[in-house]
């Protein structure tokens, strides 16, 4: 029989054994999360634990910004006031026209019997911080499930689309920016109505249009707005401007790079759009199972 | 000042309080959560990894895999990254720290940095590997800058975290 050490020297399993246990546990978590997305509940619990720390950490920058806002000079305020007045005048005409058009549009839709366009509610949120992950473009905002933010909702700023809510925690949400690698936005060219899919590249200032044939009519300076085809983004929100079109006959598709319009990595306040989708109910699928004959033979 | 390879006469320190270890880990988590941006994001060392490594080398009995692993989970949630990537990296880091602690403790602070930097880089490489396997792009070599900054912070850290352990000098004692 092996000689057991006195309990004084007992320190539990060896470090290697512990490492193996925890490494296996981590790998299991990784697979469960990356592949099957089983762990949203666990993530929610951990999010609640880390929430106070997140707020405390975001506080100094917030205080600095507010202090900066407080010490604004009189001249700067007057200047801004004058500029805003001018902008208001400039927009007044457009707004009145817009109202008239909206009314006309509503009337025509009613005439056509089309369904009303989705009335969307927006939630104003402050950006708490940029996720410190060099591999992805994400921001964290200070509104969450408690404020009716849900996963999948589009996020915009005063210019255009910023991104999409990917995870909503109780008081915070995580937003994937449109510049994140493989984040897709279905868009429409304002000039001619051509549809395409805009994808992030992982670079904060560049987006690309994917799978556009060489002869498609996309030019530098064309503005792209959301097409609304996905049912996620409401139609007509500005997204990007085409900055460079390369057509090389050796590739099947044109290489079209775009520049995001919204302050994707600059804005400090964003709007979460709560799109209420009243999609028609899914039609009942006819029972297509082929009628099984009594081919199952019983044993015996 | 010459750094001797082997530490000279060691001073006797007070026992460490577990609450202090917990507090330093919370502060490290807080520092990681600060809103860094631009170059600050690249230069930012992983404070949690640094402090976990420090305690694993200094007090391997007081801190273990469980706390390293849980901190990793919290980091994963705060970063919105895959669950378990930091947890795995911190567990391996804790293992390296605990296994190497006798060796590293024999060195003075400056040569200790030469042990710390490779360990922090290993920590980064583990996270990098997981992300590359999940389909991300290589973010460039500036990704490793934070580890070197972390190494540069090690001497400061080893002074700061030893402070509460130093016996208070009694002025009346002759």
Image (spheres, coloured by chain):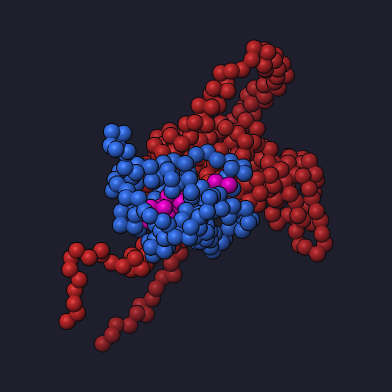
Chain colours: A red, B blue
Q: Nearer the viewer, residue B49 or A129?
A: B49
Q: In front here: A57 or B84?
A: A57
User: Residue A80, can we see it?
Assistant: yes
Query: Which image quadrant is residue A264 in?
Result: top right
Which residue does the image show at 68% across and 13% down from the upper left? A75
Q: Position of residue A23 (x, y in %)?
A: 39, 64
Which quadrant, please, contains the N terminus of chain A?
bottom left
Say which residue appears at 32% left-offset and 39% top-offset: B168
Q: Does the magenta-highlighted stretch encompass residue A57? A: no
Q: Position of residue A98 (x, y in %)?
A: 67, 24
**Foreground pick, B116 / A225:** B116
Residue A183, placed above or below residue A241: below
Q: Looking at the image, which residue is at 48% across and 49% down?
A: B155
Q: Which residues make up the magenta segment?
A: B43-56
Horizontal relation, residue A166 to residue B68: left or right: right
Residue A38 appearing in the image: no
Image quarter hosting the C terminus of chain A: bottom left
């Amino acid at each position: 029989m092996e000689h057991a050490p006195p309990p004084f020297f007992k320190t539990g399993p060896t470090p290697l054994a512990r490492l193996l246990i925890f490494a296996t546990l981590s790998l299991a978590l990784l697979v469960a999360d990356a592949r099957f997305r089983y762990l949203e509940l666990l993530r929610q619990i951990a999010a609640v634990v880390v929430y106070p720390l997140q707020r405390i950490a975001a506080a100094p920058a917030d205080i600095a910004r507010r202090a900066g806002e407080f010490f604004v000079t009189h001249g700067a305020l007057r200047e801004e006031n004058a500029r805003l007045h001018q902008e208001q005048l400039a927009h007044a005409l457009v707004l009145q026209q817009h109202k008239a058009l909206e009314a006309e549009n509503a009337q025509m839709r009613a005439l056509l019997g089309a369904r009303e366009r989705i009335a969307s509610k927006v939630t104003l949120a402050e950006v708490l911080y940029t996720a410190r992950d060099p591999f992805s473009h994400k921001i964290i905002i200070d509104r969450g499930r408690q404020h009716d933010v849900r996963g999948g909702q589009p996020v915009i700023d005063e210019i255009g689309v910023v991104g999409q809510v990917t995870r909503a925690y109780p008081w915070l949400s995580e937003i994937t920016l449109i510049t994140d690698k493989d984040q897709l936005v279905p868009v429409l060219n304002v000039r001619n109505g051509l549809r395409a899919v805009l994808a992030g590249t992982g670079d904060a200032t560049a987006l690309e249009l994917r799978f556009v044939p060489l002869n498609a009519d996309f030019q530098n300076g064309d503005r792209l707005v959301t097409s609304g085809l996905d049912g996620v983004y409401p139609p007509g929100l500005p997204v990007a401007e085409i900055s460079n079109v390369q057509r090389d006959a050796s590739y099947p598709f044109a290489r079209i790079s775009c520049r995001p319009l919204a302050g994707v990595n600059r804005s400090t306040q964003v709007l979460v759009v709560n799109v209420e989708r009243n999609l028609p109910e899914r039609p009942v699928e006819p029972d297509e199972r082929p009628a099984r004959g009594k081919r199952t033979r019983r044993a015996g | 000042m010459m750094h001797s390879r082997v530490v000279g006469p060691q001073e006797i320190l007070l026992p460490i309080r577990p609450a202090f270890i917990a507090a330093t880990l919370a502060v490290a988590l807080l520092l990681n959560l600060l809103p860094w941006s631009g170059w600050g994001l690249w230069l930012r060392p992983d404070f949690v990894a640094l402090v976990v490594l420090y305690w694993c080398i200094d007090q391997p009995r007081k801190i273990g895999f469980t706390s390293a692993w849980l901190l990793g989970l919290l980091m994963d949630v705060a970063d919105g990254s895959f669950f378990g990537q930091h947890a795995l990296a911190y567990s391996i880091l804790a293992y390296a720290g605990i296994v190497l602690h006798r060796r590293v403790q024999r060195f003075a602070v400056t040569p200790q940095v030469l042990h710390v930097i490779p360990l922090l880089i290993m920590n980064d490489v583990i996270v990098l590997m997981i992300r590359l396997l999940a389909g991300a792009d290589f973010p460039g070599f500036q990704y490793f800058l934070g580890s070197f900054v972390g190494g540069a912070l090690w001497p400061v850290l080893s002074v700061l975290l030893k402070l509460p352990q130093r016996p208070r000098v009694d002025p009346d004692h002759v």
